[in-house]
Image (cartoon, helix red, strand yellow):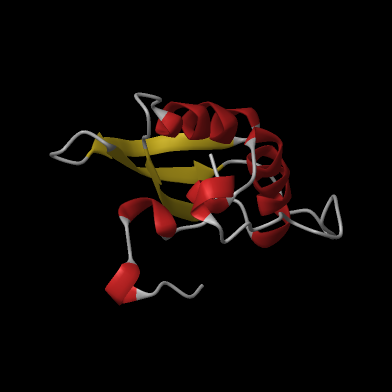
Amino acid sequence: MNCRIHKLKKKDCGVFGNLADESELNRLLANLSFLSKQGAFVIWTRGHSNGIPHSETVRKSFRKYGFEEVNFKLTTTGDIGVGIHRYLGKSLAAPKEQQLFKFTGIPSKAR
């Protein structure tokens, strides 16, 4: 991933914040079982915007796809969630879909 430091804003960097919508988040998380073996950890961040706690959506989605929450904290400013989840399921032999997600790379088009 390429983040331009001189123009970087907190929502410009990271995968989850640059997905077009919640369906893209679900597609990515559904395919993580292909990339993860049982017991694998995922460390993630997700910013909040316009009063919407997007990290709560991420936490619910991880549970839906067989991950247990190990830890979750909000930053001291309260507008970014940082989580650790562990995969409890079995690895898939192949991804569920050919494309794991669409990365907008354009903050104005991300949620």
The spot of residue 89 in percent (x, y) is 66, 42
- What is the count of numbered marks? 0
Q: Residue furthest left?
A: 76
Q: Where is residue 33 shown, x and y percent of the image?
A: 69, 50
Q: Position of residue 106 (x, y in %)?
A: 55, 57
Q: Residue at x 67, y 61 (%)?
A: 35
Q: Is residue 57 left or right of residue 82?
A: right
Q: Nearer the viewer, residue 73 or 80?
A: 80
- Which residue appears at 48% of the width and 45% of the height? 86
Residue at 39% x, 27% y is 53
Residue 46 falls left or right of residue 10: right
Q: Quadrant of residue 77?
A: top left
Residue 82 % position (x, y): 32, 44
Q: Is residue 100 above or below residue 55?
A: below
* In the foreground, 103 or 73: 103
* 61 shown above or below 43: above
Q: Residue at x 31, y 74 (%)?
A: 5
Q: From what the image shows, is residue 7 above or below residue 21?
A: below
Looking at the image, residue 80 sits to the left or right of residue 65; the answer is left
Q: Is residue 98 above or below residue 70?
A: below
